[in-house]
Image (cartoon, helix red, strand yellow):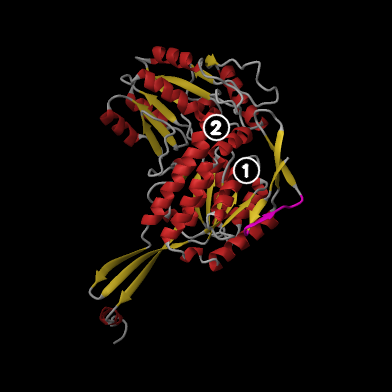
Amino acid sequence: MIHYSLLIGGKKVDTGETYDVISPGTGEVIATVAKGSPAEVDAAVAAAEAAFENSGWRDTPMHERAAVIERAAAALEARGEEISMLSARENGTPVRLAQGLSVGFPVAHMRYYADLARKYVQDHPTMVAGTVVGMIRREPIGVVAGIVPWNFPLLLAVWKSIPAIAAGNSIVLKVDEKTPATGLILAELLRESGLPDGVFNIITGDGPEVGGYLTAHPRVRKVSFTGSTATGRTVMRNAADNVKQVTLELGGKGANIVLADADLDLAVDGSLWAFLVHAGQACESGTRLYVHKDIYGDFVKRLVARAEGLTVGDPTDPGTDIGPLMNCSQYDRVTGFVAGAIAAGATVAFQAPLPDSLHPDGQWVAPTVFTDVTADMSIATDEIFGPVVSVIEFDDVDAVIAAANASEYGLSAGVWTTDYARATEIANRLQAGTVWINDWHNLPGPLPFGGVKQSGFGREMGPHAIEEFTNEKSICIDYSGREARAAWGLMFS
């Protein structure tokens, strides 16, 4: 049986208590991981603080930090087959999809951050007036806390840790106990690539107890959290006592708008991709599918026909398109939404048959397409986090934009059309942090990602990713003293 330890100050740490790591496709225990507590949080924060003060990492030239990240990215890429299979077993990502989501994206984003670090300018001189010169300096914050969920554990660990350490900070990363392996692999590869001990620490633990203690810790200066909106509110409250900086990437209810002039083949495949990636367990999924009335009937027929060709199955099988949900609580949540929608009067236009060959202890939920959905139904308003979509007819663009914006969430949206000028106009009016045009789930490193409204604030990725983990300092220099004395004369006679 594989066992994963915590990583604190460069050393593996066990606590005497463990969690079982359960494969969602089979229900079997595939590993154990040490269970952290507030004591391990204290130790990890102390190790991170010591590394920040004494390891020399924050004074390491940016090009050397970039080189460490690049070496780790290459090492991660070299282990791509292993990590893809690990992701399939640990969190049910189909292995073919995991090659991109669990390896390709993280490696590409690490290389983007390394390139950003190499080009990063820490000091910006500026003329003020006369003999007064200013210097605007970016400095690392100190100890950063990152909290990542189970759905994309490696990708989100990269988003939180790599720009933080590129900026010269130290980090304590709380990985989800259900999916600990890939975050630990990332930390080990960074150490092997030259990152000093203590700069990157990994803990696990109960969310309210350990996560709450970490986010409220007085020596943590910034928290970067991805998870539910409800937990995000708690993180904000915890951080408020010490006036910490916070980045929150929270829930979503993506509005996916298909205009009458859309390329239907493209829009159908793209809309399936939007709500079925990782069995819908993605915060930016497109689960509110608005289709213009002129193409609605044809679109639904095509959507169902295309969905019928997808395979629900063992995530370790390269032929599988859609895997299981993560655990029993996810299963209960999603099937509860499906039952509630049927009871409320929604029509099941399609529900995939589940093969008899599926493991009986796996968390299997059939991809489901609903029509006849009204705006007040829970499947149209709540984040489901499963393979369920509501297809809603519209006939007026202004009305559909208003409907899209009526959600409490604002993480993602999309538009399908052949008129790019019109698409851009609509995108500008949609209240979402990311709007895709004829695409979905495309998250390139140069574009910031994050939400508005109750989907959170702050951004990950993008050209300012490193700056998100810095403080700005102004240094004002009067080379002659004349300017200062002129001002002082207002007080001294």
Give above or below for 77 relative to 65: above
- The residue furthest bottom is 493
Q: Residues within 10 Å of mark 1 (few under 14, many from 20)?
A: many
Q: Residues within 10 Å of mark 2 (few under 14, many from 20)?
A: many
Q: Main secondary structure of the magenta part?
A: loop
Is 4 on the left or on the right of 173, as rendered?
A: right
Does dot 1 land on a helix, a strand or a loop?
helix
Check the picture and name the quadrant holding the C terminus.
bottom left
Residue 446 vs residue 233, the one in the foreground: 446
Quadrant in the picture for residue 50 = bottom right
Percent position of residue 204, x then y: 65, 48
Q: Which residues are magenta?
A: 9-16
**Do we see residue 460 in this rendering?**
no
Tag shown at residue 181 = 1
- The residue furthest front is 78
At 45% across and 55% down in the image, what residue appears? 67
At 59% across and 32% down in the image, what residue appears? 88
Tag shown at residue 281 = 2
Q: Nearer the viewer, mark 1 or mark 2?
A: 1
At 46% across and 33% down in the image, what residue appears? 407
- At label 2, the amino acid type is Gln
